Structures are given as C-alpha cells and as structure tokens.
Image: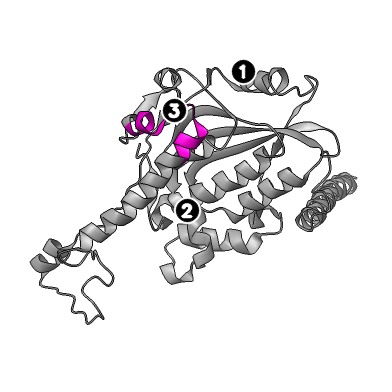
Amino acid sequence: MALDIDSILDRRQLRRKVSFWRIGTLIALALAIIGTLSTSGLFENVGSNKDHIARVSISGTITEDRDLLKMLKKIKDDDNVKGVLVSMNSPGGTTAGGEAIYEAIRKIAKEKPVVTSVKTLAASAGYMIASASDHIVARRSSIVGSIGVIFQYPQASKLLEKIGVSLEEIKSSPLKAEPSPFHTPPPGAEAVIKELIDDSYNWFVDLVTERRPLNRDEVLKLADGRIYSGDRGFKNKLVDALGGEDVAKDWLTEEKGLDKSLKLRDWSPKRPTDNLLFASAVDRWLKGQSALPFSDIDPDMLPAILPKRVFLDGLLSIWHK
C-alpha cells in the first residue's frame, strides 16, 4: 500500500514538473514570436495613432547615431506628433555627431514646436543640440555651456624611448598623419590642427549666436569653454527658463498653443539588440566577460562592452566630468 502511495506522489510531482516546463516553454515561445514581430516593425506604430507630444531622451556621449537620426525623421513625418520635448543629459561628444542631431532637430522645429528640458547636464555638443530647440529649460543646479572644441592625442614618444622602441615611417609630406603619438610633432603640425579647431569653434559660436538672444561678442565672452549652472546660464541667456519637464510642457501648451490634454509619449531609437532573439550576441558578450581570448569577441559587440568614449574619433565637443 505504501508503494502505491509513493508511486502516486511521484507521478503527481512529475506531472507538476512537466506542466511547469510546458508553461515555461510556451512563454518563451510567445516572447520569441513577439520579439521577432517587433523587430519586423509590426508594432512600431502601436500606440502612436493618437495625438501626443513626443519625448526624446538624449543622454551619454554623443555620436552620429543613425538609429536616433532615423527616429527623429519619423517624428518629423508623424502627423500625430504635435510637439517634441527633448530630455537632455549629456556631456557632449563628437562635433560631427552633435551637428547631425542638431540638424535633425532643426528640421523638426520647422514644422513642430520643440523644447529642451535639461536634466543634470547639457554641455558642449549636448548644449549644441539643446540650442536646436525653440526653448531651453534647465534646473537651477543643472550644468550648461562648455561651448568649445577639443582635439586630443596621446604622446608616447618618451615611453618608447625608455623601452628602446622606435617607429620608422616614410610619408609623402611632413604633415601627413600628424600629430603622431609616436614622436614630437614637426613644425606646423599643431598649427594645422589649431586651424581645424578654430574653424569648428567659430561655427559653434555662430550657431549659438543664431539660436540664442545674444550677439556674437556676447557669445564669445561665454564661449571660453567654461560651464555654467542652470541659474547662471539663465542669467546669461543660455537658458530661457528654470524648472523641469512640467515647465517645458507648459511652454508648449501656453506659448505654442498645444492642447493641454496631450500626453507625453516616449520615443526610443530602434536598436538591433531590441530583438529578444539575440542569444548569439549575448553569447559573444559573455565570452568578453570570461577568460577566453580577446579575438573571440565580435568587434560589433565592443561598443556594448566598453565605454562609448573609447571609440570617439575626430574633433570633440565634450566636457570631461
């Protein structure tokens, strides 16, 4: 009799385990299907068929983000988007990246009102992008400004000399590939880079002059690379109002006439990793966390593992925290 009871209990326990794994498998399958359909764009416009204010978050190091630029174009073309609130929290990044996003936002602003709400930081290329909007709101303790451009390169010549290593090179002209991290720059190399920096700097100053209620001389006094608190930025006309997203939204409704009942809806760039079926990518990332050889890591995964600043190239407009 005891054996019969034990057998019954074992069967019940086995049945529970089987049911658990069946349910788990069905859930995983459903998520996989949803992920595949999402990647195909089927759900892309779900929830966007009502009039709303698009909230776009721009944070971290700025690069020429193709996914973000595609999304900004969709916002411009979407008739249901009546206005845009840019939520900014960035120390800057590449000047080319800032320029691309700035231009995309200006295209939107020609058709729809755009306001920027600065969270902690809108510096360098971050402030450049904020300037593309029609109105800038910041907290008193936010950080804005850092108008300027920087070019950095390492100098390892003394280290190479100490360890007895030299780099020999044959090139078409003295200024080719200069300045180099492997030797002291030849005469004229730093002057060439300075010309490049000055060109980008003057363009940045002209951009701020165009977008802010300041003349060029006033902008030049502010554009010495320094940062300002939101409060001081407001006094210097780098910021239009003090407050948070509520103040930014009020400007859209009170000054631009948008319906007060319009809701904020978050828009996010569509990324390749948004697909739930990215097991291979996860596998590569895990390899990067293990002791496996570095060559096993797919180069496309490196930006997801290492800080984005490592991959910046060219002229930068960035405030180093």
Give the amino acid type for the residue marked by disc 2 in the picture. Ala
Bounds of the magenta segment: 207-220
User: Can see residue 241?
Assistant: yes
Residues packed near mark 2 inside 10 Å, few (<14), some (14 to 19) or many (20 plus): some
Residues packed near mark 1 inside 10 Å, few (<14), some (14 to 19) or many (20 plus): some
Q: Which residue does the image show at 90% across and 48% down from the upper left?
A: 4
Q: Is 219 colored magenta in this rendering?
A: yes
Residues packed near mark 3 inside 10 Å, few (<14), some (14 to 19) or many (20 plus): some
Which quadrant would residue 32 be assigned to in this image? bottom right
Which quadrant would residue 252 be assigned to in this image? top right
Upstream in sequence: badge 2 or badge 1: 2
The residue where tag 3 is placed is: 214
127 or 93: which is nearer to us?
127
Q: Which residue does the image show at 19% across and 63% down from the upper left?
A: 188
For the C terminus, give its image quadrant. Answer: top left
The picture places residue 290, in percent across and down from the top left corner, at 45, 60
59 or 250: which is nearer to us?
250
Q: Tell me how far mark 1 sits from mark 3, CA to CA.
A: 23 Å
Q: Is 164 colored magenta in this rendering?
A: no
Upstream in sequence: badge 1 or badge 3: 3
The residue where tag 2 is placed is: 96
The residue where tag 1 is placed is: 247
Give the amino acid type for the residue marked by disc 1 in the picture. Val
Give the amino acid type for the residue marked by disc 3 in the picture. Leu
Q: Secondary structure at mark 1?
A: helix
Vertical placement of residue 293 versus 303, above or below = below
Q: Secondary structure at mark 3?
A: loop
The picture places residue 303, in percent across and down from the top left corner, at 49, 56
Q: Tell me how far mark 3 sits from mark 2, CA to CA.
A: 24 Å
Vertical placement of residue 42 versus 258, above or below = below
Q: Secondary structure at mark 2?
A: helix
As drawn, is 15 to the left or to the right of 36? right
